[in-house]
Image: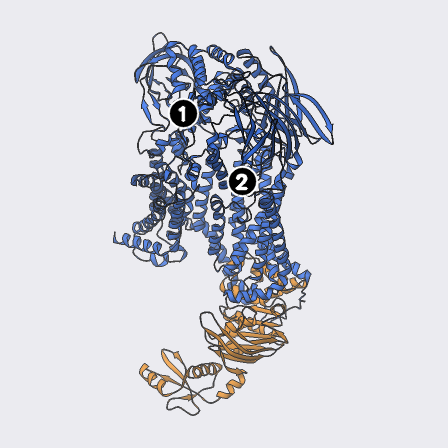
Amino acid sequence: MSMFLEFLTFELRFRMKSLSTWVYFAIWFAFSFLCIASESFGPVGASNGKILLNGPWANSYNALGSCLFGTIIIAAIFGTSILRDFQRDTVQILFTKPVSKTAYLGGRWAGSFITTVFAFSGMLLGTWAGTFAPWADHARIAPNHFWWYLQPFLSITVVQIFFMGSLFFTVAALTRKIFIVYLQGVAVLMIYIIGLTVYFADRSLEHFWSGILDPVGFIVFDNVTRYWSVIEKNSLLLPWDYSGNSPGVFLINRLLWASVGLISLGTLWALFPMSVEALTARSQGKRAAKARLLQEAEDLPLTAAGRSLVAARLPEVHRVFGVATSFAQYLSLTRLRIRTITRELPFWAIVGLIVAYAVNNGYYAGRVAGQNVWPVTYLMLQAVEGSSMLFFFIVATLYAAELIWRERDNGFDGIHDALPMRESIDWLSKVSAIAFVELVLLTVTMLCGMGMQAFLGYYHFEVFQYLRELYIVTFPLLLGAVFLALFVQTLVSNKFVGHGILIAIFVLQPILFSFGLENTLLLLGAIPSYTYSDMNGYGHFVAPLATAIAYWFSIFAFLGIVSIAYARRGSESSLAARTRLALLRAPRLLPVAGLFAFMALGSGAWYFYNGHVLNEYLTAKDRRKMQADYERDFKRYELFPQPKVTGVDTAINIYPERRSFDATGRFTLVNKTVSPISEIHITGNPETVVEIQFDRPSHRVSRAPRNLYSVYALEQPLNPGETLTLTFSAAHTTKGFRDGNELAQFARNGTFFDAEFLPSIGYNTGMELDDPRRRREEKLGPLQEMFPRGDEVHSRMNLFTPNSDWITFHTVVSTSPDQIAIAPGYLQREWHQNGRRYFEYGMGATRILNFPSWVSGAYTVRKEVYKGSGGPVNLEVYYDSAHPYNIDTMLASTRAGLDYLQGNFSPYQFTQFRIMEFPRYRSLAQSFANTVPFSESIGFITRLKKKDDVDLTYFVTAHELGHQWWAHQLVGANVQGSNMMSETLAQYSAYMVMQKKYGKDYMRKVLRHFLDRYLRGRSGEVRHEPPLALVQREPYVWYEKGGQIMYTLADYIGEDRITLALHNFLMQYRYANAGNTINQPYPDTRMLVDALRAQTPPELQYLIDDGFNRIVLYNNKAISATSQKQPDGKYKVVLSVQARKTQADGNGVESPMPMADYVDVGVFNGRKNDEKPLYMKREKLTEEHQTFTILVDTEPTRAGIDPYNKLIDRISDDNLIDVARK
Amino acid sequence: MALTITNLSKTYPNGVRALKNLSLTIGNNMYGLLGPNGAGKSSLMRTIATLQDADSGTITLDGLDVLRQKDEVRKVLGYLPQEFGVYPKMSAIDMLHHLAVLKGVSNAGERKEMVDALLHQTNLWDVRKKALSSYSGGMKQRFGIAQALLSNPKLIIVDEPTAGLDPAERNRFLNLLASIGREVTVILSTHIVDDVRELCSRMAIIATGEVILEGSPAEALASLKGQIWSRIVATDDELRALEAALHIVSTHLVGGEHEIRVFSPASPGAGFAQVPCGLEDVYFLQLSRHIRN
């Protein structure tokens, strides 16, 4: 025992004296401190604004993060503790003393364990210290709760240290090679990250084994907390018992991995030889044999070698120095350096990792948000380059350091430095060697990408895109990193100090960015973000990208040249001496250094001129401030009476190649209020220059900076019922390029902008900041809730265009001659004039919402005519020729949707329906009147591979078509709930269109995923969750919950009843306010709910209340099921179930509800997830526990309640269980 | 070839004065630098080999300013540092070819001839394709010698070249050096007096950064002729007494008893026998005188 203590205290003393322990501690301290005390830093801080930064969920999540990225630290501490003795040969002294194995291994292990736990406790202290920072967001900091710190630390961090540390310790002790230990650490990290990619790309709904087998814990964490409400995230810890959504998963996981740690320690104790020879000595034997051979060669007697004792004369050689020799020196050195890099294992390990990652991520390149898509080149590049990027930079910095220090590390500097060779030749060969290695890696990446494309059956290889991305964008940046690393390593006195500085530089950039330093010219090596689009190529990103690359490349190259001057040569190491040398070398280097300095200045000036002079430079915070100022200054006008827009006529000229447009237009305004209006308020877009005139005398009273808000006084007030015409000219001009934040609306191919670039009437609530964290920063107070249903003022405005009613619409739009321009309306005329192409669109007498858009692109067009009961409809798809995959699907979905919607609800109000592709700078599809712009990233590259794949294109097309009814015919008031009348009903329509094509079984599978999304959505709520009929800004409620409620209602009361209810509702309320001269109320969800209630039988009325007016969650569960074969050959099933129902409030606090609900009870045969119903009956459940006895004809395998998850249940996979045979 | 060192001084940042106003002239021959550890030999060698700057003083090599025209000096230099390592996984032959290119031996045929010759000369031919990192200390040292001689250098600086060589290889190396040294300047630093005695026509003894003796070994020996006396001393007490009374040059253990060598123009006393003087006596005598001063 005393010997154990001796080893332990020795280990601890040693560790506490070593700098690394304190560095690790400081890293964790700093990380967790910043997570609390800095704006948008860290995974929790940057996300949901309601989750406590020092709460149980945040502490657990950060503990997991530290476990994952701390793997290397665990490896470093545990691995080196035992290897130290072997590296320094102290074993020879140790093992010749009477040392017991237990004391030796135990002492070293325990010392490492305590040290590691100490290092990781920096997390606790940092978090705690962060909560006292006065500048932190104290709305998200709770009073410190000791157990919230300790429980995650014990159950996540300490267990992880025990398990991983023991494993590393064992491997280190048995192999006695530090390289293997680090390799193991890196491998664990990499394999885990690959595993995470696979797990999350597959969007698995499996929540048990995936959690238990997860060695780090992100999956188990997701499994357990996926549906936690914010309240739960701020009060619950990962349970040490069998409670919660994934009962026992966390507990079993921790026990499992702790025992793996124990087993590895046991193995070590059993196998560890107390001798100088490692367990793996046999493989080392080969090397020893080789060395012996050499020794023998040396020991050969001289005479045997047959050499004369007289020294022979050495031959004459000629020394030639000149350009040719310099070149030969350069070549020979470069070759040697490439060889030394490629002959060593780390290089091949990196190649292996790059390939492994590229293959894995490439395999999932064709999966975006759980959907299968074609692995087009930008997706594949994103996958393979994205996963390799870190390695590229590691290679750049690692080998820069290796090559700078190699001569010194190997002790060859004495010979090397006295060679007749210029420093610049030496330097150039270092750069070339690394550049060569990087080129190899880039090429490997490219080949992996193309290989995976071929593997996935995509044969459209765009080699030039690969080349441009990898060799023209990435390669210069990597070279820049090489230059920088060479520079740093040249100046510092120690390689590891250099590594530390470089890592700090890399890590610092994103941190600085999140702190608001977004200026590309100041963030070391930064380039503006860019997006490749199949439609638009690199488009407008080329100029800023090229300039930024040239700028940083030149700066780094300049530093590289400085590093030539400072190159170490000889034994002088003081900075003064090296500066003296550098000045001697400087004259020769001056021209090149001057060139790079000139290039840096030139490109920097050009970038600055574009990003800061031509365009106003605004950080994210500046932009938020602008929004906040708008709200602060003008919110008071929100209720100021304004006339409504009833007509819009515009002439728009789009200049795609200049990414600009200019416009003139006329708004018809009608005073639909009951009192005169003497001021017209205009919200402008800071991106647009606008001039406004009225058809009666007026003057401008005020105009806010950046054109945000202008007030015009009419000399003669506009009386009720009177009409006013507003004419405007507006222009958006793109000037040069910006420092990031390019407008997505304007592209050389694929312009798509809407009325937000034109002036609009009155105050626009859409400009308000909605993120609670940002509002707190701007001291704005909580976001204004939407107004309640029946509100006097807001009921008389519609949800989408509060200051317009239904309008007449006409537009002339012109564009470049090779492009087609599209806006809502029927094409009246198309002509060429002044080298431009003009299109005139008009809606004629058909009124639409004041929600137009203008689109222009070089399109391939598919047209067909739909001949339905309501007359022909022209269907048109405008798409990029590279994306022909889903045009048929879009058309088929449109036909099916028109059948369904016209057949059930009302005639289609238009005679055309058009879909047009636009670049993936934005990923959405949006339904304008008879016009649906659809992003190239959704729908156009969808690929159906498996039977169960969700046909996203079919679905989204049906959804957007649905909006032609649910939005473009029926629009709700600008009050709570109205959003669901367009989104939920469009979603429901799309479900029905899908179901008609794919059937019910398929829909059930799809709906399980939608249920998952709803439950995850509410778990990330930043304000409060409303019931469906009062939804405000919560997409997860109006899409996924709404869809589920409507689908289940249709299942319970019958689809035809729903159809009838919606038909009645639509026919009564569509085109509200279309012909009024005085504002009347628009419909709201009260009318919709009433219409549905009217079709619902009395015993199911609770479904209406639960579904629309409450947040109701079930906890249904099958407890047991047995079957017994009867004498008549039938099977008697005894099924015992549990049914619970709770009501949640907006924060997720639940209270139990009495149960008197109808729930499906079913018995099945077939395997899990492929069950075939034998018996299905809707039973009224009134007790929490009920038992059913059921007779079925065939032998059953599964039984349970609500088997198809029609009800919202947070543990959806315990509704069915296996039937036990008696 | 002639190397002239004038008033060379160097103080390291840690305050150690490695060279103190040192002047030497080295002609076209083998020149030995003798001195104890830390005498400044390596500092001097490194400075001549362009790897270190001096605080003051000059070094000229046939009109070249060694301290400024480093590139020119490097073109004619062959340098074997006192300690050096090698790259892992490189064979001797590849490395020699590579170094020959760097040293300006551009002609591939000449290069091969030279590399092969040196591999034979240094007895590394059989292991030429083996990785340098697997070489034993002696083999590595021989490789170092080979690389220093690659390009027919005009100025050869070898720092402790015989360290780690077995007696046979040491002899071979000295032979090789002697055969070259007739036409070029060879500076050999060592603390093994025999190296200098066997090889060098001129030598300097250096201690604490200063030259304490400069001349040919023969002259040095002649100056001591008949003045070295030897005697066996049985006990430590006796040795202590003699130490105080006489100028003892050195002691050796012979069969467990001290044999002392004493410098004295006349017989220092009973029991002493006159013995022939060796270079070692010169060395020790100069050192002890230097220390006394």
Mark 2 burial class by Cα count in 10 Å: few <14, some 14-19, many 20+? some
A652 or A232, nearer to the observer: A652
Q: Name the residue under label 2.
A: A386
> As drawn, is A96 to the left or to the right of A1057?
left
| Percent of width and height locating residue A680 | 54, 28
On the image, the x and y values in percent for residue B187 come to 56, 74
- Crowding at dot 1, Cα within 10 Å, few <14 / some 14-19 / many 20+, comes out as many
Image quarter for residue A1197? top left
Does A851 appear above or below A429? above
- Residue most extreme to the top: A1128
Q: Mark 2 lies on which chain?
A: A
Q: Under tag 1, what secondary structure?
A: loop
Chain containing the residue with disc 1: A
Tell whether A602 sits left or right of A412: right
Residue type at the position of mark 2? Gly
Residue A1026, label in figure? 1
Whether residue B237 sits left or right of residue A1055 in the image: it is left
Colour chain B is painted in: orange
Rendered position, A1037 above or below B79: above
The amino acid on which the numbered mark 1 sits, given as a three-letter code, is: Pro
Alpha carbon separation for disc pair 1 and 2: 39 Å
| Relative depth, front residue between B289 and A1182 | A1182
- What residue occupies the far front of the structure in this picture? A716
Tell me the shade of chain A. Answer: blue
**Which is nearer the eye, A673 or B271?**
A673
Residue at disc 2, secondary structure: helix
**What colour scheme governs how the chains and residues are painted in the rendered image of this protein?**
by chain
- Along the viewing direction, whichever of A21 and A316 lies nearer the viewer: A21
